[in-house]
Amino acid sequence: MTKIHQFDAIVVGAGGAGLMAALYATKGGVKVAVISKLYPTRSHTGTAQGGIGAALGNLEEDKPLWHAFDTVKGGDYLADQNAAMVLATEAIDAVIELEHMGLPFDRTDEGKISQRRFGGHTSNFGEKPVRRACHAADRTGHMILQTLYQQCIKHDVTFFDEFQVIDVIMNQGTCVGVVAIQLGTGEIHIFHGKATLFATGGWGRVWSVTSNAHSLTGDGAALTYRRGVPMQDMEFYQFHPTGIYKMGILITEGVRGEGGVLINGRGERFMEKYAPRIKDLASRDVVSRAIYLELREGNGIKGKDYVYLDVTPTTVNKYLAEAGETRRITAEDVEKKLPDILDFCRVYLGVDPVKQPMPIQPTAHYAMGGIPTNVHGEVVVDANWTVLPGMYAAGEVACVSCHGANRLGTNSLVDLVVFGRRGGKAMAEYAKQADFVPLPANAEKEVESEMTRIRTSSGKTRPYELRQMMQKTMMEKVGVFREEAGIAEALETVRELKARFQTDLSIDDRGYKFNTDLLEAWELGCLLDLAEITAISALNRKESRGAHSREDFQERDDTNWLVHSLIKNHAPSAFATGVFEPDLNTDKKVDMSLASEDERFIPKARTY
Amino acid sequence: MDMKFRIRRFNPEAEEGKRKPYWQEFTLTGVEETDRILELLHRIKWEQDGTLTLRRACAHGICGSDAMRINGVNRLACKVLAKDFGEKVQIEPILGLPVLKDLVVDMEPFFAHYRSVLPYFINNSPEPGRERLQTQHDRELYDDTTKCILCACCTTSCPSYWANGEYVGPAAIVQAHRFIFDSRDEGAQERLDIMGDPNGVWRCRTIFNCTTACPRGIQVTRAIGEVKLAIMRGSPEGVIQEGVGEIAVGNG
């Protein structure tokens, strides 16, 4: 028998955004359930390293307007400017709030929150790098996740740990809850709510080299897409320039913030060519492309497909001296400020970054696109900003869009705190005045039969074979650089894989308790759907902007493309077959509210 | 190279009479020295036997999901490499918590102990308009224990915990330590009372397994000692003169 639970507000996902939303919905006086397929402290927010951006000005002058400018420019002018301004303004208060919750930030000599430089963050509208990233060593995300989970315990938030949400329930044009499977038992549960917020994170596992956890399979995005919620700007997926070679594990931009430099096989600091002013601290899309271009010219280390990230004091001090800076770093500084990075390199590579450079390559990292929302976290389903009652989203799965075509480092943490908080508040307000919309009959049936199909599948293809083919194809053809023929081939491959997923799948575990074989296969279905709509969106956008670099359309085209892509499934009833009818439109204009008052926000050529 | 895995299995849904733990061997070919044990367990699961069940997420030692007993020592499977073991490796679930399936144990008793130590910031003074100030020195004093990822490697390596599941265990003490020695926190006395309980910090017999097991390099036994000293003195004041320092490399 399906168990039914009723809560005013349901939060799906227990990373930073979900926990922040849960806290604020709880403080708003409504009954909240947090549902997470992992124990909350396992969420991927915990792996964020370098810092959270806020114009505190603790070490040098800084202003929210400068932060907003960097965010808009970093996003290659696709960011909705109202959202970027909310992000930059509320970042300050959000960071102070985290400190009041006990977050152990590193400190300045005066005892204030310490700040460091980060890619794309500048003072005075791009003049020079600014110290804006508030940090706790190189485990800032870990400290945010721990602190928010601690606060949830303090405020007695109800958690359903190791419950995986597998469907969203709609009725009378309203979101009325979710269907979940309890991992430990395999039982199906229905969570009936007035307001449901998705904070399920990203889908880096679409690509073969990624910084993302195995759990980042885009469940929340895929299951809402299947039920007819549009996905926005799916073509914009960020490749972080510095992942550990082959493994994809993230090496924070904070390394470059502390003075680290990228070096090619000829021993050159090649970012001087691509971003003469701020060099290695240009935004991520720019640096990732620069690395690919170096590799293409045969400038990889020993002719291979990687370059070096060098934070050895000798190298760093040489370039600091060249730049006329008085600051110097020591081995002890590196140990103190980047302990986890050193640990990763020593354990996984046998490389000691204090003495040797680190081999790195770009790694699939962050989805700028996702479930479209307004600045209150409410899900909006069309170009007219029509709200879908009862449904909210925040964090990486959401697309506000404050990041536009390329997110700046540190802004993901800002996003989840600022918009998680807004989403939580909005849910509480809504839930207090709304009644429960009844559940439809047999709400769990369709997804339950999908689960049964996978559990009893007896084809010839094991899920990992499909997953590896998808990841390889997407990495090669819908990665840092794309062009029409390649994307079209990738789309065709993904569709073949989807067909095999439906007709020829085979798993081993037929049980109910902790059937991770079943759930991994179901997650593969999510990844395939997201890979498909990523490719369709990438094929459609005939320009290069931010993280979307078309070799056949190399220029940004502000005349035709200052618009968001919305891709929508028009066959929600085809749920069981997996054959969707995606329809893409670009009617939604980018918000230019800052530009209308300040000409510095008008799109212009983007140089660093 | 080839690598042999001997893995402790348990299927809670096996038919009556067969529902007991057993060892199973798997062989992998083409193993690279730098492969993480987690990757190799994935290869077994994906290529050979999908029923093999384990927890994992980030795969680089930060989320704390994949604690298991590898060649008799608690490790995160994602933070040890094939070359650390050679051609044979034995893997079983962490000890002291009920096994639910294969390498998956019931984490609820562990998190219940965690929750019992008031693992959250307590400061009821009016909040200032900006951040509370803290000196770099004071921040350093509790730095080591902020690294904890709640993986349970320490607690489930502790003989005192194996003998008595009511003991809060090293991980919960580490969490208490993180707040007791934070100059901004006002809940130290309350936590020291909890730690002074018969199932609190005095169950520790200074065996040091926890310190060896910690994949984050936390000086767990030292932290427990500092909490003991604070209880003896009636206050955390002055117990720690200097932090452990940041020169800490994981044991993995």
Image (cartoon, coloured by chain):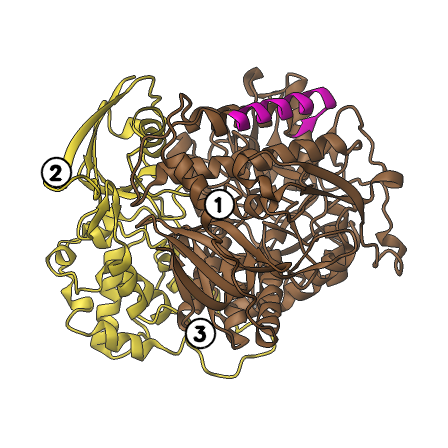
Q: Amino acid at mark 1?
A: Glu
Nearer the camera: disc 3 or disc 2 = 2
Separation of marks 1 and 2 at Cα, in angstroms: 34 Å
Check residue A189 for magenta coloring. no
Nearer the camera: disc 1 or disc 2 = 1
Q: Which residue is mark 3?
A: B184
Chain of the residue that carries numbered disc 3 in the rendered image: B
Chain of the residue that carries numbered disc 2 in the rendered image: B
Where is B229 relative to B71, above or below? below
Check residue A486 for magenta coloring. yes
Q: State the extent of the magenta-drawn residues as a range.
A: A480-499
Separation of marks 1 and 3 at Cα, in angstroms: 52 Å
- Quarter in which the N terminus of chain B is drawn: top left
Residue A120 in the image, given as x and y percentages of width and height: 70, 46
Magenta stretch, main secondary structure, is helix
Q: Observer-nearest residue: B53 or B28?
A: B53
Instruction: Decide which of tag 3 and tag 2 comes sooner along the chain.
Output: 2
Residue A374 in the image, given as x and y percentages of width and height: 70, 59
Q: Amino acid at mark 3?
A: Arg
Where is A598 relative to A47, above or below? below
- For residue A446, the mark is 1
Give the colour of chain A: brown
Separation of marks 3 and 2 at Cα, in angstroms: 55 Å
Chain shown yellow: that is: B
A592 left or right of A184? right
Q: Residue at x 28, y 34 (%)?
A: B52
B1 left or right of A398? left
